[in-house]
Image (spheres, rainbow, N blue to C red):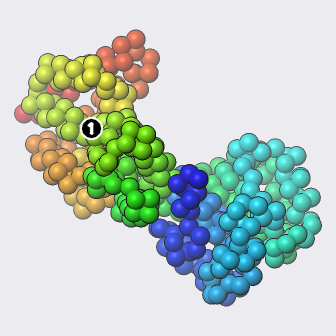
Amino acid sequence: MVLYRKYRPKTFSEVIGQEHIVRTLSNAIEENLISHAYLFAGPWGSGKTTLARLFAKAINCENRKGYEPCNECLSCREINEGRAIDLIEIDAASNRGIEEIRQLKEGAKFSPTRLKYKVFIIDEAHQLSKDAANALLKILEEPPEHVIFILATTEPQKMIPTIISRCQRFDFYKLTLPQILRKLQFICENEKIKIEDEALELIAGNSNGAMRDAESFLEQVITYAKTQKVEKITQEIVKEILGLIDINIISKFLDFLIEKKPGVCVEFLNKEIEKGLNPFEFAKTLLSYLRSGLILKIDPNLNNLLLENLTKEARDKLKQQIERLKENDLRRMLKVFLEAQNKMKYSPIPQLPLELAIVEVTESLSD
């Protein structure tokens, strides 16, 4: 079983992050204040479908104590094993038409076969066609008592307002680095995997706040380590497997820019590309690094929010570098390298726009 399924939370207490949502849903379950429709909105990998399944399991649990499902009764077991016929999951990205929603409407008329509630989880609900969305709206206006809808979406602004108004809305946030790290450490301890703290930080930092991505990255690295009989997973192994850019390369590159050495910059970049550096990934990582530097320059209080994906040494180095730059310089760098990144897609020589950007930036830096 893949890691994200094996370690999917089975109780609310196991959920990492989204405390505001867990608390509200837990209270609603305890007080038996169950709504007929919910909207879970938030970024990819933030736990929307996980909490939707947990909620469906808790309200249908036969031996629930408080708000936590028992995970032992037949209803809980069926949901945990993915064979509960009264829990229907629909991917709106591939089932977005009017016919699918009409079938859903017909299915909603019938009472649950086994569970107390028939629960429909509609993922990526914003991708429903206009006709399908209007058909869903009609169901939400007069829903059967035994039916609960949970709509999950990464883009709530694309949904029709009348659907949103008929749902209890919960906004999910990206998970923080410490939250993701805690889960990854737990998995490694259970799987008896030896891994450096820096390697785990690198995986968590590059997951962009998505637990699913972090767990998938970890699984890739573990699979490699097992096949190559690696005793302990290092930071270098993680960089190699996931194709990550070493932040030290970005840091050295910025040093050469600050020192106004365009020739050294171009030579350094091309040598790294010869070693296998992906110029597109380089540009992406450089822009992220410069963005962190700019916002840190504007407001040092945003330190923790922006620098979570950097090690302590990298954070200290970035702080030293931005002390040598003016805010206007950082803004100009971001603008020039952002334009270069866009031009790289159409350039016959991928690194050429970066080389031109190097010359432009070093010529425009303040004395």
Crowd class of label 1 (few under 14; some 14 to 19; many from 20; radius 10 Å):
some
Q: Nearer the viewer, residue 298 or 146?
A: 146
Q: Is residue 357 visible?
A: yes
Using the image, determine if residue 158 lies above or below residue 110. above
Where in the figure is residue 307, as x and y percent of width and height? 28, 53
> Within the image, what quadrant is residue 346 found in?
top left
Q: Is residue 139 above or below residue 347?
A: below
Residue at x 27% of width, y 19% of height: 274
Q: Position of residue 28 (x, y in %)?
A: 65, 82
Is 363 on the left-hand or right-hand side of 65? Answer: left
**Left or right: 37 with respect to 278?**
right
| Above or below: residue 175 compared with residue 10 | above
Please indicate whether residue 86 sits to the left or right of residue 24 in the image.
Answer: right
Residue at the location (31% across, 49% down)? 232
Query: Residue 66 sits in which quadrant?
Result: bottom right
Residue that mark 1 sits on:
246
Which residue is drawn at the image coordinates 22% and 34% (left, top)? 249
- Expressed as whole percent of the image width and height from the top left, the position of residue 118 reads 81, 68
Looking at the image, which residue sits at the far left?
A: 367
Q: How many marks?
A: 1
Left of 259 or right of it: where is 200?
Answer: right
Q: Residue at x 92, y 65 (%)?
A: 109
Report helix, strand or loop for mark 1: loop
Residue 354, percent from left and from top:
29, 23
**Residue 163 appears in view:** no
Q: Residue furthest front?
A: 229
Which image quadrant: the C terminus? Answer: top left
Q: Amino acid at mark 1?
A: Asp
